[in-house]
Amino acid sequence: MVESYFPIEKLLEKLGSSAYKELLLFCGVKNDLQKLEETLTTVKSVVLDAEEKQIHNRRLSDWLGKLKDACYDAEDVLDEFEVENLRRQVMKQRSIGRKFRNFFGSSNPIAFRFRMGHQIKKMRERFDEIANLRGEFNLIERLDDHRRVVHKEREPTHSFVLSSDIIGRDKDREKIIEALMQTSSGESETVSVLLIVGLGGLGKTALAKLVYNDQRVEEHFELKIWICVPEHFGERQIMTKIIKSITGQNQGDLDTDQLQRTLRDRLNGKRYLLVMDDVWNEDPEAWRELKSLLLGGANGSKILATTRSRKVASIMGRRGGTTGYNLQGLPFEDCLSLLMKCAFKEERDKHPNLIKIGEEIVKKCGGIPLAVRSLGSVLYDSADEHFWEYVRDNEIWQLEQKESGILPALRLSYDQLPPHLKQCFAYCSFFPKDYQFDSHYLVLFWMAHGLLQSHNKKEDLEDIGMRYLKELVSRSFFQDLNFETFGREVLFFKMHDLMHDLALLVAKDESLVVNSDCQSIPKRVRHLSFAAANASRNDFSSLLSDLGHVRTILFSTDDGKTSQSFVESCISKSQFLRVLNLSESALEVCPRKMGNLKHMRCLDLSRNYKIKKLPKSICELQSLQALILEGCLELEELPKDIRYLVSLRVFALTIKQKSLQESGIRSLGSLRCLTICDCRDLEHLFEEIDQLSVLRTLSIARCPRLISLPPAIKYLSSLETLILWMCESLDLNLNVEMEGEGSHHDRKNTRLHLRRVFIRGITQLLELPQWLLQCCTDTLQSLVILDCPNFMALPRSLKGLEALETLAIKECPKLSSLPEDMHHVTTLKSLLIEGCPALSERCKPPTGEDWPKIAHIRQVHLDGEMIKSSDN
């Protein structure tokens, strides 16, 4: 049975914390607090039973909905205390005059105490009323779900590899490739269409990718294009997506005629392959218009489309030049092989009893790879026969399964998630289908909504979020994984459509993607995503009548245009907003009322190229955890009071200032990640950078005039990742003597503990400076040096780097040898050398002079070739 994510647990955790108890006592509502906790605890005990029974009882479902709404509203009230506490911290830093000036305003402590005391009493009465109704439903107290079997924690990396494995589709691949490569001079149109049709979860997209990446296809077509198709696509959207796939650039600011000319120029005379993944549009006219746009290519051009809609296949098939390919389920043996591969690290013959049970489980999956993979993740590394039998005999298999419904296997997989992962998965439904997730942004999103709870003060919320994410990946809730590991660990991934449908089912009516057909937004909706069709509309008054409960607004604008008035109206009506994503919205002015969003945790204004100033009021967002200004190329300066963003943990910045010395960034004491990029005029950062005492990641990219780093950088004791990218004028030598300098703390006991150093395109770099390595001999795990044309020498000795596991050197033609003691670096697991001719020659086995120094390394990549030695 699929249980919906319920916020009652999170609410109880907040009420139980000492910080909230202190604040609530301040308002003189001790009795109300105790009664509220008692009521919530009582209600919580019957929620599991209520969720199971609601499917047969509409009134019970409504009761749960009222309870969930009350929990969310209670969170908003409690959040007021957190905001007020932060505001008071900031007020202590400001002048006495400012305090008196605010006394008679909304922040008057007496007025605040009275107002919040009244709200808490109302909250308690509301929960009492809801709790009294539970007796009508004969609910049973169940503090724990005893059906759930918890097995040992899995290794996340195990399924990273499995998620890209495709079993049993070799014949299908060959047939499709054969069809794509057929070219007939008698064809009436230059482009023909091949449809892959089949049920959700069969692996249509995976098969299309196999074909798309095949070497024969690569050689046959001059141009390859891959796009994910919106359900209700328009001509502009499709053209923008195709052009972006070809060029990598979003040209949505062009008008329709310009887009058409650009598209024709790109396709003109070329034999191309266009993959249109997941087509749902059932409008014959839309398909006719689209195909007319694509006739400019050479004879033999192909469109490969995937769809699970038979009606779409029928509509597309009515036109000439269209062939359908019906994808069938995997054969039984392939399904069994996939299940065992997902379930075990060891060979399958070590678990003969489980194989028999597995055979019966596979028969229920209907040959659908997604279902098999999902169940394999549930069973991962469990040798408990009773648990396998529980999966095999689960009542979920008896539920009626419709073609467009949720697969029972996915329901069961969700049911086995721990509560904290259920919460995080449910919140993924708030993003549109086919959304390209970025692990760092998703973790910020979870953090902004309070889903990441730290029970260990030494563990940062960012680490907790990555741990949650990797667990969901290992359980096959995400797919299409790509990694960026050289600079910092970033995962890019998507959700399968059926997984997205499951997340929507779990979240119920809390999220809404607003498309052109939407006439109103229900009050229960708390997370909004605006499609391009609405982001530029001006008749917003009826649509935005009530956003009082909304916590998330995402603008998904494929055409790069967003109405200024639309954005301002959204902001003015959304007092409890936690996340606002206005990335690539082409705004010219940042809305002044932004500072009223006192609950805001994550604000993304990235790649708004026309914004020149930020409103001063933005510095009043004391709860703000992430501020993304990356790619705001015309932003002239930061507000002087930016230092008062006391909760800011992530700050990404593009600015036109020459110096950041007076910016106030050094006073951001909660900052964990600082990214400074595309600052074309920036020459100096800021001294006393070591005041950022908890900074873990510093990334400086594409700042061509930056001359040096602040000398105090060597005292950033929490810094783990340093990324320096394409800063042509940067000199890494710290010429200032450090011993005699004053500081806000004792520097004798502080030093760098870097784990990852990533250097690229630093023209001035001749050799690695001593300060960079001497301070992190026992911590540095990864060292990457790319595109440094004048780099000539690694340190004379690497033996002191006791933790080094990865060394990558690429396009450094003046580097000609490795350190003499390289063979003593026994921790080194991976070495990559590319674009260094003299060094590559010395490292060639078995006669190269430097080969004995590296023969012990497990993975040696030399100019794109994997080298194996007798020692490996």
Image (cartoon, grey):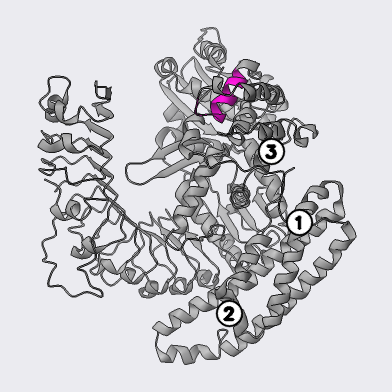
Identity of the amino acid at label 2? Leu
Q: How many marks?
A: 3
Q: Is residue 6 magenta?
A: no
Q: Position of residue 635 (x, y in %)?
A: 36, 62
Using the image as rendered, state which of residue 672 and residue 275 is in the foreground.
672
Quarter of the picture holding the N terminus: top right
Q: Position of residue 117 (x, y in %)?
A: 67, 82
Question: What predominant SS class does the magenta segment belong to?
Answer: helix
Q: Quadrant of residue 523?
A: bottom right
Q: Which residue is mark 3?
A: 412
Q: Which residue is found at the position 36% from the left and 68% from the top?
A: 638
Upstream in the sequence, badge 2 or badge 1?
2
- Left or right of 853 on screen, residue 483: right
Upstream in the sequence, badge 1 or badge 3?
1
Q: Which residue is found at the position 42% from the left and 63% from the top?
A: 649
Residue segment shown in magenta: 334-346
Q: Which residue is mark 1?
A: 47
- Left or right of 478 on screen, residue 5: right
Identity of the amino acid at label 3? Leu
Residues at marks 2 and 1, CA–CA distance in whole angstroms: 28 Å
Identity of the amino acid at label 1? Val
Upstream in the sequence, badge 2 or badge 3?
2
Tag 1's secondary structure?
A: helix
